Amino acid sequence: MKNTYINKYLPFVFLYFFFNSVFLPLGLLYTALLAPFFLIWLYLNQSLRPLWIFFAVTLAFACIHLWNGIDSFYYARSYVLLFTSFVFGMSVYLFLRKVNNIEAILKQLLICNFIFAVAALIALPTSLRPTFFSLGPISTGVIEVPRLKLLTYEASYYSLVMVPLVLFYYLKMLLIRVANPRLVFILVTVPLILSFSFGVLLGLALSLFFLFFSDIRLFYIHKRFPKYVILGGLLILLIFILVLQVYPDNFVFKRFANIFEGNDSSFKGRTTDSFFLAWKTADMKSILFGSGLGQIKVLGMNLFTRFYKHYYTIDSINIPNSMAETLAFYGIVGMLGRLALEMYLFFKTKVYFNYYRLSLFLFIFIYQFTGSFLHNIAEYVIWIMAFAGRFPQFDKNNVHKAPVNHPNF
C-alpha cells in the first residue's frame, strides 16, 4: 500500500526533475502550464489559504507600480509566471506533507539521474551533444567546455535541481553509516561534476562547511571522521599541486584566476553587475518599491547597452540573481521583506534542529546572492524543503544516537 501511495506522485516528480522544459520555448515549463491542475488539487485538500497572502502582498505592490507607471504586457506576463511558481511551491509543500517516504523517491531519482548522465556521455560525440550539454566558453580565455544539462535548458539550472538530492546523500554518507558508500558517492558526484556549475559547487561547499562548524560535534560523529577530513584535505592539496605542475593552464584554474582578477563575465554578471543594474533599474521608478515585475525588459535596454557596451534586444535582458531581481522589481522594501521572511521561517520552523534542512537553508541563502531568478521553481523547492520537509533521520537527536547500518542506500 505504501509503494502505491508514493508512486502516484512519481510522474510529477520526474516531470519536474527531468522533463520540465522538453519541447517548450525558453522560459516556459510544464509545471507552469499545469498550474490549473495544481490549483484544483490544492482546493480539494483545503490548502489555498496562502494564496490570499500572495495576492495581498503582490497587489499592494502592483498598486504602487501602476501609480509610478509600467508596461502592462511585461508586468502581466511576469506576474503570471510568479503566480504559477507560487502555486507550484504550494503544491510541493502539500506533497511533502502527504508523502511518508520521500527517501524512496530520492533513491529512484538518484539512479535514474545517473543512468541519464551515462546516456548523455555516450551521446557526447554525436549530433545529440547540444541536447544534453550546454556548450560554449565558460570564462574569458577558456576553451569550450561541454557542461551536462540533460533535458533542462542550461547546466546551472540542472545542477540547482540536483541540490536536494546531492545534500541528502552527502549528509547520509557523512552522518549515517550506509551500505555501498563508494557507489553512492559516484552516483551523486559524477553528474554534479559534469554540470560544472561553479555557483552551485561553491554553494554546496560553503553550506557543508558552515553546517559542520555550526555544531562541532559533527566532526566526532564517527570515530575516524577527523582522520578522514585531514586525509581528504591533504589529498585535495596534493592533487592541486600535481595539476598545477603538470597542467597549469587547465580551464578550472583559468576560471578561478579570472574570478579573482575580476575578469569572469559570468561570475560578475551574477553578482556585482546584477546588484548594480538592479539598483539602477529600481531607481528609475522607486528605489523603495522597485520598478515593477518585468520592467527590466523595458527600462534596461539603454542601461544594459551602455553598461556592457554591446546591443541588447528586449528579450535578452535579464538579471541572473534572485536577490538582485527582487531589488529591481520590489525595491529595498521588497528585498528587506524577503530577508525578514526567510529569517522568520527559519526560526518558526526550527530549521536548526535538522542537519539536512539546515544544509538546504544555508545553500539557498548563499545562492540567492549569486544566481537564480525571482520565479525559479528550483529555488523555491529548496526553500520549501528546508522549511517544511520531514527528514527525521537527520534530526540532531537522532543523528547523535549510536549510528546504525542501513540495508540499502
Image: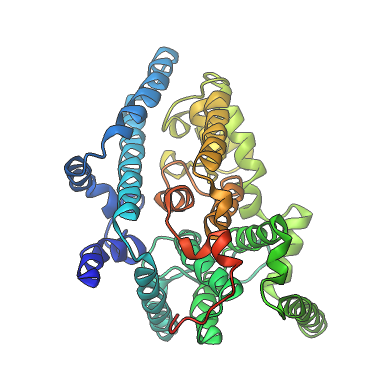
Looking at the picture, how far across and down is residue 111, in whole percent?
Answer: 39, 79
State the residue in front, 136 or 78: 78
State the residue in front, 317 or 179: 179
Looking at the picture, how far across and down is residue 223, in whole percent?
Answer: 71, 79
Tell me the quarter of the picture where residue 327 sits. Answer: top right
Residue at (51, 21) in percent of width and height: 289
**407, above or below 106, in the image:** below
**23, above or below 225, in the image:** above
**7, above or below 87, in the image:** below
Name, please, the residue furthest toward the top: 67
Looking at the picture, how far across and down is residue 322, in whole percent?
Answer: 52, 42
Q: Quadrant of the C terminus?
A: bottom left
Q: What is the basis of the colouring in this image?
A: rainbow
Residue at (54, 26) in percent of width and height: 331
Looking at the picture, how far across and down is residue 183, in whole percent?
Answer: 51, 86
Q: Quadrant of the N terminus?
A: bottom left
Left-right relation of 72 to 367: left
Residue at (51, 82) in percent of width and height: 405
Tell me the quarter of the picture where residue 321 sits. Answer: top right
Q: Is residue 145 visible?
A: no
Q: Is residue 186 visible?
A: yes
Tell me the quarter of the picture where residue 133 sits. Answer: bottom left
**197, above or below 301, in the image:** below
Name, please, the residue furthest toward the front: 402
* Count of numbered circles on the image: 0
